[in-house]
Amino acid sequence: MTRTLGADLPALAEAAPARAALVCDDEEVSRAALAARIGGVAAHLAAHTAPGQGVALAMGNGPELVEAFFACAVSGRQAFVYDPAWPAPYRAAIDAALAPALTLETLPSLAPAAFPPAPSPDAPFYVGFTSGSTGLPKGYRRSHRSWIDSFAASAVEFGLSEQDVVLAPGGLAASLHLYGVVHALHIGALAVMMRQFHPRRALRLIARHGVTALYATPTQLQMLVEAGAGESFPTLRRLMISGAKWRAETRAATLALFPKAGIAEFYGASETSFITIAHPREAVPAGSVGRPAYGVTLRIRDASGRDLTAGEAGAIWVASSQLFDGYACGDAPETRREGGFLTIGDHGRLDEAGFLYLHGREKRMLVTSGLNVYPEEVETVLMSLPGIEEAAVFGLPDDLRGVELVAVLRGAVDEKSLRAACRKLLPAAKIPRRFLSFEDWPRTSGGKADLRALEAIARETFTR
């Protein structure tokens, strides 16, 4: 089995040179052209950087970014995948912290070249970025081995093969979509991407290319469902959703839009890859995020590091060969290692059958009136109510309770009815004291709710 990323691309190109490898909107790149371009960029990197050095990819979404990413991987360099939406201070802080040996904002015209010898499977090849506690992104470093073993988990859990057509419609600065495109190309499947996500254009790509597998965030899925109301796309056989919080009507609309798609929901993190998988055919208990993914072992531990029994809640510890190497910049005090296991500060419990239930993140936990409250629990309840599309719960300083719970909502809200519904589903201390509703939610480049921006809005609104 190939142990480094992209090593099989020349063989795939030789086997079927004219076969399409990558589609980006209306642009199509063949296997032969893709391999030749990657080889040319790899030769350029070898001429301007040393093995192991970092290359900042400050490029927009498109085939050029994919080619530069693979060129870093096959040449033994580290790809720093920058988000083009970063404000200038973010970009400057990351540059200062990582000091890339080379920055690519475009690709020069380069002659095709053969691939260089493969690097070590344990060599780092990628630094991605996720939100940090200081407001600046923190960079997480991954090795070839960690992603190759994640690909093995994808093969088992999702059944993707060279015959698939895989759409990852979001920006590649988000690891979910980068992973989807890179995995498809690595195994010889057709990868489909977009320079900018637009739901109607995404649906047209699904129809035009017979897309069989789709990676999507919950927000993107909701937008696809709304854009495709009344339509059906039967070629899709696998829908892979990260961190979904399903409403019953959303699931029903999804199945109407993609009637032949098996829905696989997975819980994971940039630092861990896959943690759990929820397949409907496995009769996942209500409220669970599934059982451990292929190659993953889970433990629940208390604050002293003691393993807890089924039903007891504590920190979630993960062991697998898919874990990240460490942070390249920034830090996260809640991320810790011990005896081959890693925790990122998420809390939950396992049942007797090994299914995992999330309680929330350690860093988001709030204490109000002496009670520990995980905002995620309250958000899940709020989103189960009619008319609430999204919810985010925060804690604001309060002289009486220590922290006052407030909720920001997207959707139609009747506050009186909302409070009455909450009283039936939540203890009094977990019911938000104040609610704010608006439609124009700030989002990250990956399409997720921007919790930091939402909290700032809540603070500004409620502390006037």
Image: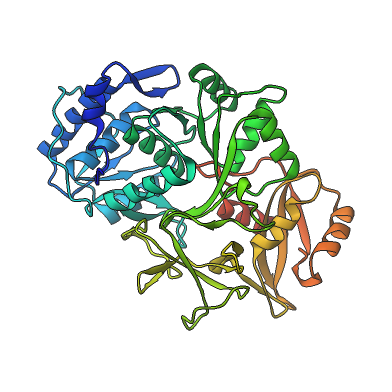
**Is residue 143 at all visible to an observer of this figure?**
no
Q: Which of 402 and 165 is in front in this view?
A: 165
Query: Would you identify the image quadrant in which residue 375 lies?
Result: bottom right
Tell me where residue 431 appears, x and y as whole percent: 78, 65
Residue ranking furthest to the left: 47
Q: How many labels does the image show?
A: 0
Q: Nearer the viewer, residue 163 or 330?
A: 163
User: For the N terminus, which image quadrant?
Assistant: top left
Q: Residue at x 34, y 50 (%)?
A: 149
**Is residue 126 at all visible to an observer of this figure?**
yes
Q: Nearer the viewer, residue 288 or 87?
A: 288
Query: Is 309 left or right of 333, judged from the image as shown?
Result: right
Tell me where residue 266 appears, x and y as whole percent: 53, 50
Above or below for 84 versus 375: above
Which colour style is shown? Answer: rainbow
Query: Is 171 left or right of 311, judged from the image as shown?
Result: left
Tell me where residue 53 appears, x and y as whole percent: 18, 49
Q: Which residue is drawn at 44% across and 46% down?
A: 156
Q: Residue at x 41, y 49 (%)?
A: 153
Query: Is 443 left or right of 192, judged from the image as shown?
Result: right
Q: Nearer the viewer, residue 19 or 382?
A: 19
Tell me where residue 106 appears, x and y as whole percent: 28, 29
Query: Is 449 left or right of 341, judged from the image as shown?
Result: right
User: For the C terminus, which image quadrant?
Assistant: bottom right
Q: Which residue is drawn at 48% across and 30% down?
A: 167
